Amino acid sequence: MKFKNKNKITFRAQKEHVWEVRQKPYPASKELPDWWKQMPPYSTHDNKLTLNPYPTITVKKCAPTLDAITAGYIVPLWADVMVSQENGLPLIKWTTQEQVFDVWTPSQVSTYEISDGFSPTIFKYHHGWTIKTPPGWSCLITHPIAYPNLPIRAISGIVDTDNFETDINTPILVKNNFEGIIKKGTPMFQIIPIKRENWESDFVLEKPNQFYFNMEKLKTTIISSYSRTIRVPKNYK
């Protein structure tokens, strides 16, 4: 689908090696995981146990989930790497002359709380792309939402990419005791542009029956009610 968009994210190759050898970031919607492709949109259920005569939707018909896993762009791993264990800690090796990973020194992450099941060693991934967004736009850098079971996990952060002009060395964790090859093309982290704005919070009590009426309006359509009545399409190219 063609659309006009005044907002543009630019990925700048920091050197010729990046341009000639390394894979480019791509829209997250371009490559969805197998579990999503294989999931049916509706599940079967026993009509004796429910008054609902219609099939139950699965997460594949959940528009908020789809919007999350297809948001922004994926930065892939640009070379195969071999992970081995040495003294209970992961060691990463590769065959290219250019460096794929580096390690954060322990003092840089001294009391950072590591997720259960992951090694305390924190790596830096050298992807080689400088990310540039329009004025007022930052980027949420996070683990690829559609890939929760990778042997690695990116640590999230927000970078003001309209002003930041150098490396974003996203911290990467490796699963405890994992050994094997992480293949070229594996999604390493997801980039989601976000507009910087100031916010205030407020708390109110809804009018009597308002929540009920809102739900009734939503249920006046049977199939894809959220997508048809509420959802605003998000596009990334």
Image (spheres, rainbow, N blue to C red):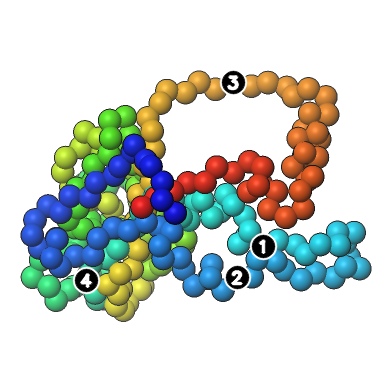
Q: Can residue 118 be seen?
A: no
The residue that disc 1 covers is 58
| Front: mark 1 or 4 | 1
The residue that disc 3 covers is 202
Q: Which of disc 4 and disc 2 is earlier in sequence? A: 2
Residue 69 horizontal/vertical position (percent): 48, 56
Q: CA distance from mark 1 to mark 2?
A: 8 Å
Q: CA distance from mark 4 to mark 3?
A: 48 Å
Residue at 63 percent across and 48 percent down: it is 227
Q: Which of disc 2 and disc 1 is earlier in sequence? A: 2
Q: Amino acid at mark 3?
A: Asp
Assign a secondary structure to mark 4.
loop
Tell whether label 3 touches label 2 (CB within 8 Å).
no
Instruction: From this view, report whether residue 72 is shown above or below residue 91.
Output: above
Tell whether label 4 touches label 2 (CB within 8 Å).
no
The residue that disc 4 covers is 79
Q: CA distance from mark 3 to mark 1?
A: 33 Å
Q: Nearer the viewer, residue 94 or 128?
A: 128
Q: CA distance from mark 1 to mark 4?
A: 35 Å
Residue at 40 percent across and 57 percent down: it is 28
Q: Amino acid at mark 2?
A: Met
Q: Which of disc 3 and disc 2 is earlier in sequence? A: 2
Query: Which image quarter holds the N terminus?
Result: bottom left
Assign a secondary structure to mark 1.
loop
Q: CA distance from mark 2 to mark 4?
A: 30 Å
